[in-house]
Image: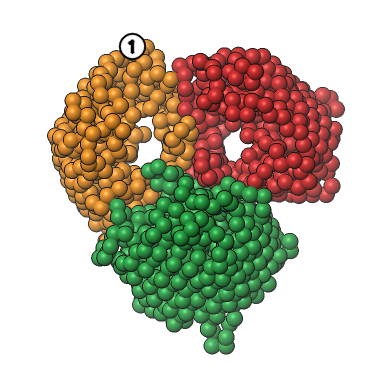
Chain colours: A green, B orange, C red
Amino acid sequence: QKVESVSSNWYERLGFGGYTQLRYNRLFETTDQLECDQCDKSLGADGGFFLRRSRVKFAGNVAPKMYAYLQFDMATSGGNSLSHLLSLKDAYFDVALDDEREYRFRIGQSKVPYSFENMQSSSNRLALDRNDALNSAAKDERDLGVFFYYTPVEIRKRLAFLTKSGLKGSGDYGMFGFGLYNGQGAGRVEKNDNIHAVIRMTYPFEFTNGQLVETSIQAYKGKYTIPLSEGNLSNQDLFDDERIGGTLVVYPQPFGFQTEYNIGKGPEFNPGLMTTELKKLKGGYAQVMYRIEKGDHTFIPFIKYQYYDGGKKFEIDARSYLVKDTEIGVEWQYNKYLELVALYMISDRTFEDGIRPIHHVQGNTLRLQLQLNY
Amino acid sequence: QKVESVSSNWYERLGFGGYTQLRYNRLFETTDQLECDQCDKSLGADGGFFLRRSRVKFAGNVAPKMYAYLQFDMATSGGNSLSHLLSLKDAYFDVALDDEREYRFRIGQSKVPYSFENMQSSSNRLALDRNDALNSAAKDERDLGVFFYYTPVEIRKRLAFLTKSGLKGSGDYGMFGFGLYNGQGAGRVEKNDNIHAVIRMTYPFEFTNGQLVETSIQAYKGKYTIPLSEGNLSNQDLFDDERIGGTLVVYPQPFGFQTEYNIGKGPEFNPGLMTTELKKLKGGYAQVMYRIEKGDHTFIPFIKYQYYDGGKKFEIDARSYLVKDTEIGVEWQYNKYLELVALYMISDRTFEDGIRPIHHVQGNTLRLQLQLNY
Amino acid sequence: QKVESVSSNWYERLGFGGYTQLRYNRLFETTDQLECDQCDKSLGADGGFFLRRSRVKFAGNVAPKMYAYLQFDMATSGGNSLSHLLSLKDAYFDVALDDEREYRFRIGQSKVPYSFENMQSSSNRLALDRNDALNSAAKDERDLGVFFYYTPVEIRKRLAFLTKSGLKGSGDYGMFGFGLYNGQGAGRVEKNDNIHAVIRMTYPFEFTNGQLVETSIQAYKGKYTIPLSEGNLSNQDLFDDERIGGTLVVYPQPFGFQTEYNIGKGPEFNPGLMTTELKKLKGGYAQVMYRIEKGDHTFIPFIKYQYYDGGKKFEIDARSYLVKDTEIGVEWQYNKYLELVALYMISDRTFEDGIRPIHHVQGNTLRLQLQLNY
């Protein structure tokens, strides 16, 4: 794990890669009222082909104890009708304290170590979107700040294996992690004088039969400034924002099971009083999957159920949510460059804010995604 | 044409390139009222130096049957006064069905195969801007969707020669092409539940004297959602959008001739009734050019005349146009990195919308462009 | 200095590099009213961690007499609350007239050769922000146009040494430079029919004891279109904009001294009459520094005082400024990849516009910056 030397050629020092996800969500839909701002803006009425993510990254060891990671998104909405601007997704730098790089600081914009599904790359996730319950913890999963990670070499090797082997691990965000960050979300201007703090511990167990199981606990605390609609009667926009969550992942060898749950408190719109209040929140998901290899191809059928009862701090008025979604799908890895996911979504969502204080949508649709890796 | 193997080094797998066009349009102008939103925003009053295009691309075969192409524009307007944002121009992936790559799907954001001049790279075009008549078919020539192309190996070689030899071909968009796409234009949010369909056939003839002649036919059909101004009395914004066009290119060996024409129907503002209506449209262009090589330098003088009578769906109210422009110019290729184009434009344009229902501009100007390839 | 040949591999032709600056300005602040739009938007209330700059560049000789330079910023604000969009910082091309490249045109968007501190890369500057007096000459130090530079080979070598040796030179913007450019600033739409002209001469003296001293004179002239607030009673927005300035840099071997001063005239808000007028402006800065090398580490303590009395043309109403700031700090170069700057700022600023016609802020704060080079 020690970096002995670094090439003097930039193109050997840095690797290049990325992926693009093209989606179409409108086949066999039972209503065109499906909507999920956080998940996929092309659900429901007026949706068509959609680049959900289009990413490129440059990353590598620039010095024995320093690793650089730059990732751009190329499908960023710029308001009005522009949808394919480039923006910075990650710009972080790992500065290791020891030669083995067991102790390191991660500086810049990077993922907030809260929730396995948030850490796991979208290019590896089976379901098209992250669950609402834990993904509402950090806008775009990322923030700007300084994080500290500790991972013993042996654990680092295990975490690396979980990613490289196709078992869809989360990567190495520390066996132990701690961080201070703005808290308003990736690429967002800080709006208050408070910083957020996060802490996480994870452990990937390896059983004698080779089965890998990872379990984690994580928590964060801070204050969030929410956007208010005109109709909102609230006289404050700064709210406590704190959560604690647990994770269990039984990696698919070939049968897998994955669940996460979190509780906490944060801002949530109250449609009865037309105001935003500090409220309790809770929710999580459970997923079963089965990994089948057929020649060069890999198929992973899966079922995921998710539940969330709480507000979403980064949406208008900290929109109130009650989510009960089921997804039944399959990922087909044609080769390492091309993947197809098809899933049938059975959705039941109540989401209410000052503009639409009563709003409940139930419906199903077939969702398709072609992913290209380069 | 078969890709035998692909390097394991990303920098050998992917090529890098691009070009930048710096313009100045204000010398010898007879009026400062010249304007063309679609062509060049620096024409007329308050125009100065202008980066019309600044592009970089990464492209290459990432696997024997998979080709990736990513192109960014670095001179994208972000509304208000920002003019040099980065945006995605192309993010497409060719997935071939056979080893010879004769049959392939193109997935992502790419050029809509409609019109030779639209397909041809702006870095190769003689005139500074594309013609209004066929370029108004697809905003920024591109859209998001899935395209299918068939090109026999022999035709592919001929199309490749037309580009590499400096004859300014369009590249390979299939001898036969078919596609489904959103229809609102590149990097634009889809605004309706309809998709567009396009079909095209082209054939590059090679005569026994070596003279190359290409002829094509193309058509598309869909529905377009237009932006309406406040004064527009129309009670609909969704209109039929369909066209058929023909192409003839006699490549400059050394004398060349190029013409395209299309007819169709689409939304067009009616200044008499202050409303947008579904109307017929027609128009095209003809160009003659002569290729002169002098040592390392190449000079190509040209004359182009264009005519368009119809609306432009992606402009406010589907602005009504009557265009009769003549351009007389010369391209000087100093070397393969540096090109200068100077042209004298004799313009006669009527363009009317709900904000300026009566608007006719006649005038001339000298236009200069320095192009740098890298 | 002659480029003998250029590699046929793009990755050998072009180099890649960049740097990221993460800041935190809120420790030991005596007031949260500190603000400086031009310097650092995270000063004062609601500031947190902040990516002040995050850059990548591709640059190299693409042909014996042609050099390409592309630089992107990845922390560009896109209005509202988006803060990490990608935008073009530099896209310029040096076309040399002679093999030794002593005479060259620089075409595209590049730095306006006015002021040493403007030319010097932010990655090399000791103080966190440029001085107001000379940096207010050109928005983001850059503009779009065509520049001509002449540098004899011997002087070019000396200027290159000043950068490579860690003495924090400005790079080669010509011993003599002249340019024509839009004048509204980098990545800004031109807003009037005038172009700006700039001229500069610099000379780096080398004394027999090895001490290097650089002195420069520079001037520019043009017209600027300012943004007006609603309360501004001015009936014009186009103003003369001209300055002349001098530079003296005694490079830190180990003791260094640096000063610049400029006078001129330009638009400035008058809070008494609530209008913007053409007024005189003056100001500059002086800095002393001392370079200490300890093993692999370099420490450079410095003190900088700056003064500016004038308007800032690119801010609302050409906001009126009276600035008297002192900075006492130290730069610690941990290695060539990692730098930390800590400085204590003692600020006294009056800045007034149509929205806040009476506004004076005095206060101090500790500012921290971690810079990562890659």
Horizontally, is A193 left or right of B136 in the view?
Answer: right
Q: Is residue A240 visible?
A: yes
10 Å crowding of disc 1: few (<14), some (14-19), many (20+): some
Residue drawn at x 64%, y 25% is C357
Instruction: Name the image quarter holding residue C161.
Output: top right
Residue B337, horizontal then vertical, whole percent:
44, 32
What residue sits 34% from the left and 70% below the top?
Answer: A346
Residue A38 occupies quadrant: bottom left
Residue C164: tell me if it is visible: no
- Residue lying furthest bottom: A208
Decide if residue A303 is on the left or right side of residue A194. Answer: left
On the picture, is C77 further left or further right than B20? right
* Residue B159 higher or lower than B357, as above or below: below
Q: Position of residue C140 (x, y in %)?
A: 59, 31
Does residue B277 sit above or below A194 in this rendering? above
Q: Position of residue C64 (x, y in %)?
A: 52, 32
Residue at image position (65%, 46%) is C46
Type of residue at label 1? Thr
- Badge 1 is on which residue? B30
Query: Residue A305 sits in which quadrant?
Result: bottom left
Whether A153 is drawn above or below C281: the answer is: below
List x then y, in percent, for residue B57: 43, 44
The residue under the point 59% across, 81% down is A205
Pick the quarter of the image with the C terminus of chain A.
Answer: bottom left
Q: Secondary structure at mark 1?
A: loop
Chain letter for mark 1: B
